Image (cartoon, rainbow, N blue to C red):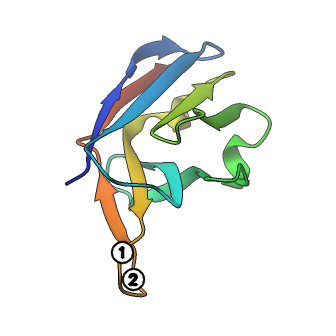
Amino acid sequence: QVQLAESGGGLAQAGGSLRLSCAAVGSGFSVNRMGWYRQAPGKQREMVATITSDGRKTYVDSVKGRFTISIDNAKTATYLQMNSLKPEDTGVYYCNAQVPTTTFTPLQVWGQGTLVTVSS
């Protein structure tokens, strides 16, 4: 069983920075990909950034050049460095891990979410 523990959310002013962390806890697992998703009030959850175990990264256009995702060497933790924050970055940020299984369908694991609020 894999669980994700997030930390690092909070309040920031526009133009400021925050760093989110997510650690995968469990035994005998590996991940194909980890990522961050966010859900703003009244909106659907959207992908913010993902990173594969071999380091390939994707970002939603709105955060390119401002956010950086990384993964640790053990491939059990991911980080999201958020710079030049904007009020529209406000939302609950969820960590996601894609864990391979014996079937063709990987297991999607989600964290509990951490709130990021950016004031103007």
The vertical placement of 4 against 120, above or below, is: below
The vertical placement of 29 against 23, above or below, is: below
The x, y position of residue 7, in whole percent, is: 34, 23
12 on left or right of 58: left
Point out the residue furthest to the bottom here: 104
Asked whether the viewer can see residue 51, the reply is yes
Q: Are marks 1 and 2 in contact (CB under 8 Å)?
A: yes
Report the residue marked by disc 2: 105
Choose top left, top right, bottom left or bottom right for residue 116: top left
Mark 1 vs mark 2: give the one in front. Answer: 1
Report the residue marked by disc 1: 101
Residue pictured at 33% horizontal, 47% vertical: 41
Residue pictured at 39% horizontal, 83% vertical: 105
Point out the residue furthest to the front here: 28
Which amino acid type corresponds to the residue marked 1 in the rendered image?
Answer: Thr
Q: How many marks?
A: 2
Q: CA distance from mark 1 to mark 2?
A: 7 Å
